[in-house]
Amino acid sequence: MKTFKELILEDKKYKKLLIDSYKEFLKDFFKVNIKVNIKILKRTKSDYFGDVDIGMLRSKKYVIKVEDGYNFLHYISHEYTHIAQFLRGDLDIEDGFIIWKGKKFMSTNDYSNINNFDEYKKLPWEKEAYENQEKLPKKFLNSSFCSDLKGKDATLDFGIENNLWF
């Protein structure tokens, strides 16, 4: 028998409504007019939460992949921040180096070999993304983007009223 949490995580209708509204909120917050494709992946037991391929951004293909679960709005916020950083010109990858605010920051090999999570979270592009993943879902909850969802889906209403994703 499935738990209530499992049933909510499987419901696709509310997720589409929630994600579509959240994407509009993020476009407004970051002041960008782009189309972002968000793929919700099946949960795994690894440390993977989501990603955005910076290399794909140059071709204007904005794809965010995040794991399913209650924190998926947090993960979307995190990855959307990286897209905004790229669009602002703050973050890029060039010739095997991560470029931050116009300067070579570190090699992609060094980045890939970071084992200390606290060290990883202190990287300037990650610091901003982690801050946004905490604050943006809460800002969304108090926005017109969220209030406009009321009454569109019973599962969604329950989730919003009980702060399941925020």
Image: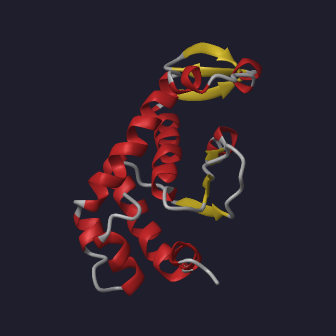
Q: Nearer the viewer, residue 131 or 109?
A: 131
Q: Is residue 131 left or right of residue 108?
A: left
* Vertical order, 163 against 98 (above or below): below
* Vertical order, 143 against 131 (above or below): below
> Residue at (53%, 22%) from the top-left corner?
123
Quadrant for residue 110, please give it.
Answer: top right
Observer able to see residue 153: no
The image shows residue 51 at horizontal and vertical percentages of 63, 46
On-image quarter of the C terminus = bottom left
The image shows residue 119 at horizontal and vertical percentages of 57, 19
Q: Is residue 161 left or right of residue 80?
A: left
* Vertical order, 8 against 104 (above or below): below
> Residue at (64%, 22%) from the top-left corner?
116
Q: Is residue 16 left or right of residue 154?
A: right
Quadrant for residue 43, please give it.
Answer: bottom right
The image shows residue 101 at horizontal and vertical percentages of 49, 20
> Residue at (50%, 75%) from the top-left corner?
16
* Vertical order, 131 against 28 (above or below): above
Quadrant for residue 104, please give it.
Answer: top right
Q: Is residue 163 left or right of residue 112?
A: left
Colour setup of the view: secondary structure
Q: Nearer the viewer, residue 137 or 70?
A: 70
> Residue at (31%, 76%) from the top-left corner?
149
